[in-house]
Amino acid sequence: MLFTDSIFLLRFLPIVVGLFFLALAVTPRNWRARGWRFSLGNAVLAVGSSLFVACGSGPFIRWIIAAAFLNYLVALAIDRARQVDDDRVGALPEALLTLAVTGNVVLLGAFKYAMPLPVVFNERSFAVPQLLAPFGLTFLACHAISYVADVSRGHMPAQGSPIRAALYLLFFPLLCAGPLVRYRDMGPQLATRRATMAAFAYGVRRWLVGFCKVVLLARNLAGPADAVFRSSAGDLGLLEAWLGTFCFALQIYFQLSGYADMAIGFARMFGIRVVENFRWPYGADTVTEFWRRWNLTLVGWIRTYIGVSHEASEAGMWVGVREIFVVFLVVGFWHGPGWNVVVWGMLHGGFVAFEQLVLGARLDRWPALARRLYCVFVVLLLWVLFRAESVDGAVVVWRAMFSLANPVEPTSLLMTPIEWAALVIGSVAAVPFWPGSGRWLVTVDALTTSILILTSTSIIFVWRQFANTLLFLTGRRR
């Protein structure tokens, strides 16, 4: 069950949203005074998230629930051990942290790499959906590591309530494609947050933006990209290879950023703020800058919990090179099994290291247009390796991209009008051409809030009139 499925949009989401706000409405006032305002609402979200995972993971739900419960117990044990002033338990928190991290990594590796499952995205177009084998396990493992690590380091106490812990570990908006949210960022919001009509309106707008990205742009760009990467060497022309690669570059951006937008929107509907995951990556002018804008939460998670960064290190050149390649090795493995994806990550690491440790300040002296073209050129070439089924398949596309022997195939540009429209609109929407758009978005949020208030008021009025009529007809009201 994905965010774009009709069963999710027409059944699951309305029921969960309705029950959540109903739970807030019926929460006793004395609970609110004690800081328990969201206790019933969190229970609704935790149960809904468990059902969401069950729909996607099938028989593997028992493993996911068991993993979440074990991480909850380990975090409680770490928290209590840290509060005991006794030399005998001094090393216990670190031992429990090591045990929890090892268990999560082994569980993820066993399912994701030893026995990868079929993809769960309907639009099979690239390797990223293999993240979800079984559904939600990758994000559960990363959130579990964040949970026990933040508790062990003293950044946040463990959740005494299993409902709150389960809500962080299994929160359904974050399980399709992220973003990754650190426990220290989401933990305080589990007990206290603002679930207002304005927040709900913002969530609706972000969901709509993400939905349009996925359904209108990404899906229509998938066809040309798939056609190119399924072509054999003799059937692929120069323009066709470049066009298909460009379509895929836009497709994967709108696919992932669209799901991230929807996740941010759904979370905001329930009053939870989630950090941004993409900030106009195709507006970057270096590969290093690209990774400051692409999949921000993954890079931030690696920096926080593995302790390495893709930025230049002050400890020396070789330390910097090592850290950069560790980051992009993890990035490669994160994006799914397949050596071509791992090599894709390492090549990105090579370009980042070259920019920071060899070019340095000289890159800043390049003309802005030259830097932008260089970045786009490198990113496009590496997307070929990411999308291809193997390194050999990537070589076929690369040869076509730089071969003049067969520049244009007669059927290479036979795209439908809808696909051409998606390509043009996507090319404009993928770069930050609109610096003043924030003011318009505030207006859109205000209009959405007004519409929601009017709609909800109308529904309440109609329901009351219907109830009064029913009471009158049954003789209970005169």
Image (tube, rainbow, N blue to C red):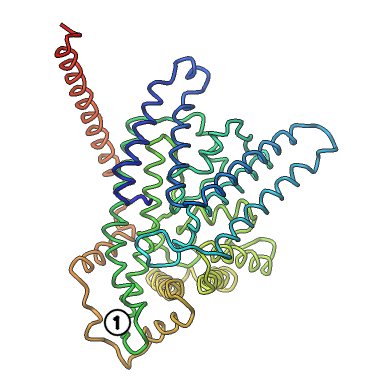
Task: Give percent across and percent down for residue 216.
Answer: 26, 58
Per the image, the residue denoted by label 1 is 239
Rendered view: 113 above or below 406 = above
**Residue most toward the bottom?**
405
Q: How far from the left and from the top, in percent, is residue 361? A: 54, 68
Indicate the quadrant where residue 447 lies: top left
**Residue 70 placement, left or right of 178:** right
Instruction: Please say if 175 is above or below 198.
Output: below
Identify which residue is drawn at 56% across, 71% down.
346
Q: Secondary structure at mark 1?
A: helix
- Position of residue 84 measured from the top left corner of the image (x, y, whole percent): 78, 32
- Is 279 drawn above or below residue 401 in the view shown? above
Residue occupying the point 41% across, 59% down:
120
Tell whether 312 sits left or right of 229: right
Residue 463, image x, y percentages = 21, 23
- Give me the residue at 48% from left, 14% from top: 30
The residue lying toward the viewer, choosing from 384 and 433, is 384
- The residue depicted at 30 percent of the width and 51 percent of the height is 211
Residue type at tag 1: Leu
Mark 1 Cα-neighbour bin, 10 Å: few <14, some 14–19, many ≥20: many
Quadrant of the drawing holding the C terminus:
top left
Q: Quadrant of residue 230?
A: bottom left
Where residue 267 sits, quadrant-wise, is top left
Q: Nearer the viewer, residue 289 or 276?
A: 276
Furthest residue in direction top, as rendered: 478
